[in-house]
Image (cartoon, coloured by chain):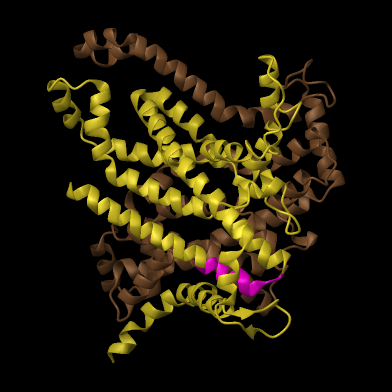
Amino acid sequence: MTIDAIAEAPATRSIALTISPWAVLKWVVAICVAIVAVFPIWWMINVVFSEPGTPVSLNPRLYPTSFSAGFGKIMMIMRETDYLKAYYVSITYSLLTIVGVLLIGSMAAFEFALFNFPGKRLMFAVVMLSLMVPTAVTIIPTYLLTAEIGWLNTMQGLVVPGLASAFGLFMLIQFMKTLPKEMLEAARLDGASHFQLYRYIALPLSKNALVTLAILTFMKTWGNFIWPLIVAPNPELYTVGQVVGLFNSPYSHQTVDVVMTANLLAALPPLVFFLIFQRKIVEGIAMSGTKG
Amino acid sequence: MIAKKHIPHYMMVLPFMLLFAVFFLYPIASGFFYSFHDWNATTTARFVGIDNYTRIITSRDFKKAMWNLATYIVITVPLGIFVAFCLALLVDSFKGTWSNIFRSAFFMPVVLPAFLAATVWRWIYTPNFGLLNMLLGWFGLPSVSFLNDTGSMLYALIAVDVWVSAGFNMVIILAGLKNIPTDVYEAARLDGASPLQQVRYVTVPMLYPVLFFVATYGVISALQVFDVPWLLTGSSFASYGGRSNALLFPVMDMMGRGFGALKFGQASAYGFILTAIIILFTAAMFVFRRKGYDQ
């Protein structure tokens, strides 16, 4: 560490040398915190990939010990429970939500960010105010409305009420405000229709923001527990979150190995997403925080 | 003529505004209506005035939930921000690859859905063969049933919550740290400020708006805590809140009244009480912030 510091900043050499006990402490703390942050996830993986039934005293599950046992458990869950169906429901729910949020959000953001029309300020103000209203107030009345329309236990009941995302709209507006207006003007002079401006200029140029929003929406939908719990109580439409809840319920009588396998399967998509899109996710969250 | 020119604009915002009106504005209005009615979703609603509100406020569960919530917020929010702030400083002090590696490691828990964090931690807390009790065993300490002992339940929840939220807040604070110009630190250093003094007199004041956002957001989401305590206590609509309601929180109480007891009028009223609290809290924080600036 000190060597790095010296290489980085030769001018501050003396400082780097005098703070070296600090540097050691810093590394120790950073590594300890990293262990605390990652270990529960690591432990979950180890419990899955170890022979079931070995007492903790003999195998404390600090590292994976049996890959065949792990795959065996995964196959068992896939075969004997409706986990695959829940996967299918959760993926459909997430994909439809992403497509919907992106489509209607980008259409509205395009107008709010780049044009002026009567009533725009009022609409914008109302939507932005809604960011302050907690989900807690709307969730029960929204459920009652969904029930009234007859959408309980349907995919549209899961998806549609969540599509008008004020957060997503806000994020896209912030981004689209920075689009070059001259390009839109030039395209209009070339005879492009209003919709073509959106489709062929604004959308491609907003790709970055759209990808970030898609990833954040995926994380949120995959992790949504409360809405599927009340709107789709029918086992036919259980999401992964609900199935995990069942495995973990006090009445489930499953062994810790099986429960952890169910948990790991639910964690896999977001973890893989994170490993691929790390930077986008972190930037997206940082952006929502510093601009909000 | 003028109106016709604007039609394309309205067409484009229509899908969003329509869904927004139907699934956001209308439910708020109808929820307000139901909050003054006795209604179980099947019979016709009966007007009861402010009965729902008074019943909630005078109920024992409400008081217990509010007390739990207050204790929870007072500990979780400052602790969470403190941890996140330290983590951000820590990550920021590393260079290049290591900075990225530690940032990713600290951020990892945020990626897990909250329902998963709760279920994994439930097993870590398990008496006898859970990970935490195994650690206690190595030090010769007796096994604790963290999620069944009313004295430790709240702290068990807080630990999970800080574990989950620290990485999220850290990323926001890190972005704020990057916006502080380095010459400010340079000037402080020339004036003989120690690293700790630099944090106290440069970093914290410069980060004030970001920390304020993190605190406000933290309080608002803490007021609505649901998934984690619900799953830690193995709750269902028939029975929730854990042993002697030690982990009963307002949103859990609200959902229980709605879907357990089928008192949707009361549940709607509960939502408005919570909103009122959230608005008061946010307003108080903004006033507090204004005062902080004036000084």
Q: How many marks?
A: 0
Q: Who's the residue at 34% across and 24% down the image?
A: B93
| A24 displayed left or right of A268 | left
For residue A187: magenta?
Answer: no
Q: Relative to residue B34, is residue A143 depicted above or below?
A: above
| B69 displayed left or right of B201 | right
| B212 displayed left or right of A154 | left
| A225 displayed left or right of A134 | right
Q: Who's the residue at 30% across and 74% down the image?
A: A121
Q: Is residue B251 visible?
A: yes
Q: Relative to residue B61, is residue A7 depicted above or below?
A: above
Q: Relative to residue A93, is residue B188 depicted above or below?
A: above
For the C terminus of chain A, the quadrant is bottom left
Q: Nearer the viewer, residue A35 or B135?
A: B135
- Magenta portion: prevailing SS class: helix
Q: Who's the residue at 64% across and 46% down the image?
A: B246
Give residue A226's position: percent from left, percent from top: 63, 57
Give residue A8's position: percent from left, percent from top: 28, 16
Give residue A91's position: percent from left, percent from top: 66, 54
Q: Nearer the viewer, residue B141 or B129?
A: B141
Q: Who's the residue at 81% across and 26% down the image?
A: A68
**Chain given the colour brown:** A
**Chain given the colour yellow:** B
**Residue B150, image quadrant:** top right
Q: Residue furthest bottom?
A: B1
For the N terminus of chain A, the quadrant is top left
User: Which span is picked out in magenta?
Assistant: B262-272
Q: Is residue A62 visible?
A: no
For residue B268: magenta?
Answer: yes
Q: Relative to residue A247, is residue B139 depicted above or below?
A: above
